[in-house]
Image (tube, rainbow, N blue to C red):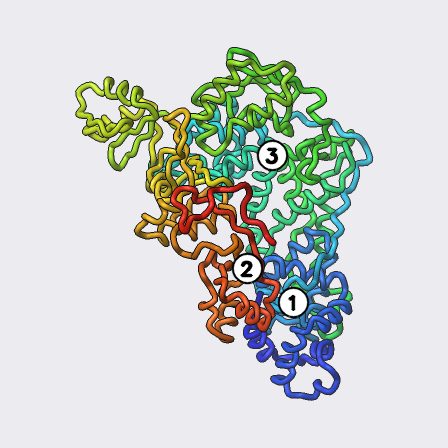
Amino acid sequence: MASDMVIQGVLDTVPRSLGAMMAAWLPPAARGLRREAQVRRYFEQLHDAGRRAAVLASCTPAARALLAIASCRGGERPLGELIEDAAAAGHDVTLAAVGEAHRAGLLFIENPRFWPGRAAVWTRAHNDQLALVPSALAECAGHVPGAPMTPPVAAEAATPRPHARQPALVDLIEAFFQCVTAKKIKTTQEGRLTVRALRCFEERFAVPLPGAASPLHPAAILAFARAAGLVRVDSTGTVIPAARCAAFRRATRAEQARVALLHAAAAINDDERLARYGFSPLRLAHRLIMAALSRAQQNAWIPTRALAAAIARRVRHVFSAAGAPRDWTWTRIDQPLPEDDEWAAIVGAHVGTWLTAAGVVETGVTASGADAFRPTAFGSFCVHDQARTPAVEHTRRLVVQSDYTALLTHSGPWDPLSQALTVFAARTGDDNASVFRFSRQSVQNAVQHGHTISELIDAMDQAAAYPVPGNVRRHLEEWGAAGAAAVFYRDANLFTFDTEDRRDAFIGKCHGHDVTRIGASHALVHASDQAVLDLMSLSGATPVDYTQPPVAGIEIGEQGELALPANGDFRVMAVAEAISEPAAAVTPPERARRMLSWAAMKRCNEPEQALDRLSRLPGRPLSLNVRLNLLVGFGLMPLPRDNEVTLATGIGPAERRLLGSRGAWRRFVAARLDSETAVIKPDAVPDAVAMLADAGFASRLQRVRFTPLGAHGAPGGAASPAQGGASTT
């Protein structure tokens, strides 16, 4: 949003009268003041909620919609983009609404030379000007419903047109993440996919890949996955799963494809037409087509050329000034717009290539030879968030066999069971019948990247036609519980194994190399880089790359137990050892549990740095009670009295500056949980309450219950861990 200072600078330099605008905000007695004084009174009225509501109520829905759209992305956007968004959302916003918003003091063009006026002319350059919204009007317009375009309906039936065979988007995304899990995708130094990586996709589907502009191209999927934080590229150029990958892959294939499609649609652009018209006709056409699909009746064909003509009429209507307030309009419109034939070419090409390739529509030909299209089941899912297909639970059948395979019939891209099996097993077949083959490698890959074996077993128990065989269940739990059998630390040529026997077996294979045993599970190799990499491949060790952030952090349960999804990363293990100790009773010994320990934290030389490193690790956020226990254990706050803590929430930098002007706020704070949450000292609670109430922040205080979790060496004789955690009182 634009600050009052920026808006004031614009209003002070406008060469036209502002009488009509000031009349909407100022009382009659103030309208005779000089412009500088009127502008100051205008800003005073802007911060009056009652006056804002009265002015907004007097505006048309089109002006309120323009304000709502301009406010949703910061309040400083080019006019062309703003008008494009309004047209795509179905609002009846025209240039008349832009003039009305100026007269009402809701929105202003940054350059006063482009303002509406008695002799103003709208040109292509207007689309590049920023539209400024005063910060006091942020989110004041509320929700203004639009009216999506109602598509024309073909008067005659159409015959579906056969298309060249190509992989569906849902299948391509599944193949992409399976290749990522297997570390088969590499990028060049410029960030592009290597030829070998592209060949992996072609071999998998046995069909040529689509063009680079298609949403089905692997490069487009890679761009989406990197932007969404699902994958990252390590120092060798290999694409590997990132912290958000596991949560994304728990969704069904159709849901994954929908998110990828939305990302690809946001990247649609046409630089040549954007420079010519000041807005993107291709992007606007895509959004209007999707809006039309949302209003289309089931199995109804939409004539392509008729829809293009409807889009052309809407755009001409948007760039008109009919009905604008007097003296707040543009008397002539010199805005270039695409002709009807160009709109027909844009819509026809986008439907026939991009939307068809994405599986959103299928095209057809009417009896008279006219082109038409209709939404597919996946297209309906994209525009309605639901599929027009029967629920797969009523027809599918799952049989888990003792040879570690599972047969699933009558599934589909909306089937969560099919997705759960795909994450943990290698899949062959199609949605009519698929065979999933479990292996130690496939299960451990899934677990290593954030999934839990309980996801798979619970899903199979609920859906299997017969009980899951005991040997399959036992081995799945064993494979899913074990961490990486071997880990390779590239910066030290150090191999770490889960058992001493496996370490000794590895040393026995290192013929001709100098290997030093370290402890019960480590082996230090003295050899050339190539020899060490060969040994890594021979042992199947997982390399740890310290040039990238850890793939996961530390999870601390409500009983104080620690879990390390990134087991084998020394950075994570060092932080874990700084805050915990082994549990007293361990069964079996090789799976020692660690419990949160105040005694271990008291021995830490740099408690603030340890707490900062812990908070920066990826993974699930720590609970409020765990964070309070960490502050106590590190000695950054005293042990709470009566196991209760007073917190001040929502106290950011601006609030702290205001409180600082009223007194020494810092003397009330015992510790900080985050940038906006502070723990109040018990003796200072009454004074803190008074200061917050005086500043209008009385509702920011809350009391929470504290449960000690540092069972090992708790300071002051604190109780051992109890059930539950921090709760608001």
Residue designated by label 2: 649
Q: Nearer the viewer, residue 672 or 245?
A: 672
Is 195 left, or right, of 392 in this rendering? Answer: left
Dot 1 alpha-carbon crowd within 10 angstroms: few under 14, some 14 to 19, many 20 or more: many
Is 574 left, or right, of 293 in this rendering? Answer: left
The kind of residue tagged 1 is: Leu
Dot 2 alpha-carbon crowd within 10 angstroms: few under 14, some 14 to 19, many 20 or more: some
Between the residue at mark 3 and the residue at mark 1, the CA separation in whole angstroms equals 40 Å
Can you tell which quarter of the image residue 470 is in?
Answer: top right
Tag 2 near tag 3, CB within 8 Å: no
Most extreme residue toward the right is 155
- Which element carries disc 2, helix, strand or loop? loop
Residue designated by label 1: 137
- Taking the spot 54% from the left edge, 27% from the top edge, the residue there is 454
Compared with 26, 312 (above or below) is above
Q: Residue 3, which numbered label?
A: none
Mark toward the viewer: 2 or 3? 2
